[in-house]
Image (cartoon, rainbow, N blue to C red):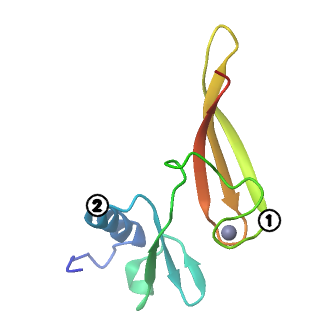
Amino acid sequence: MSSDFSAEAKLADLESEMKSTLKWLQLEFVSKNGKVDVSEPLTAHSTLNAKEVPLSGFTGSIDEKKCRRCGSEDISVSRTVEWWKMNGDAGGQLTSWCQVCGLQLSSSWSDE
Ligand SMILES: [Zn+2]
C-alpha cells in the first residue's frame, strides 16, 4: 500500500484505510506477540500482519458454543434489544465473542 500517514497516526487510521481499499468489513492486526489494539500508534510496530475477520452477519449465525476459528469453547454471548413492539415482540443483536482468539460475530434475532 502506498498510503501516507502522519507520525501520530494510529492503527485505527490504517484499519479504516484498508477497509475502504480492500473492501474488508472487519479486520484485525496481529504482531508476533498476538493481537494488536488499533488504538496503538502505527510507529510502535515495524512489522504487522493484517487479516480479515469473517463476519457471520451474512451467514446468519454466531458461534455460541465453539469458535469456528480457533475451536475454543470459551465463548461469551451477549444479546442486545434494539426494538420492541406493543405485542411484546422484540429484536436486536446477538454477539458472540471468543475469549481466546477474539473472534467476534454478530447476527440479529427477533421474536417474530
Ligand atoms: Zn476463537
Q: Which mark is residue 20?
A: 2
Q: Are marks 2 and 1 in contact (CB under 8 Å)?
A: no
| Mark 2–mark 1 distance (CA, rounded to whole Å) | 33 Å
Residue in the image at 49% along x and 48% along y: 58
How many residues crowd around disc 1 within 10 Å: few (fewer than 14), some, or many (20 or more)? some
Residue 49 image offset from top left, x and y in percent? 45, 83
Residue 89 image offset from top left, x and y in percent? 67, 17
Q: Which residue is mark 1?
A: 73
Q: What is the total number of numbered labels drawn onto the structure image? A: 2
Q: Amino acid at mark 1?
A: Glu
Of callouts 2 and 1, which one flags the residue occurring earlier in the amino acid sequence?
2
Q: Which mark is residue 61?
A: none
Q: Is mark 2 within 8 Å of ligand 1?
A: no
Q: Of discs 2 and 1, which sits in the foreground?
A: 1
Q: Amino acid at mark 2?
A: Ser
Residue in the image at 30% along x and 67% along y: 22
- Please indicate whether residue 82 sits to the left or right of residue 5 in the image: right
Residue in the image at 39% along x and 72% along y: 10
Residue 36 image offset from top left, x and y in percent? 54, 76
Dot 2: element: helix
Is 19 located above or below residue 11 in the figure? above
Is 109 located above or below residue 74 in the figure? above
Is 21 located above or below residue 47 in the figure? above
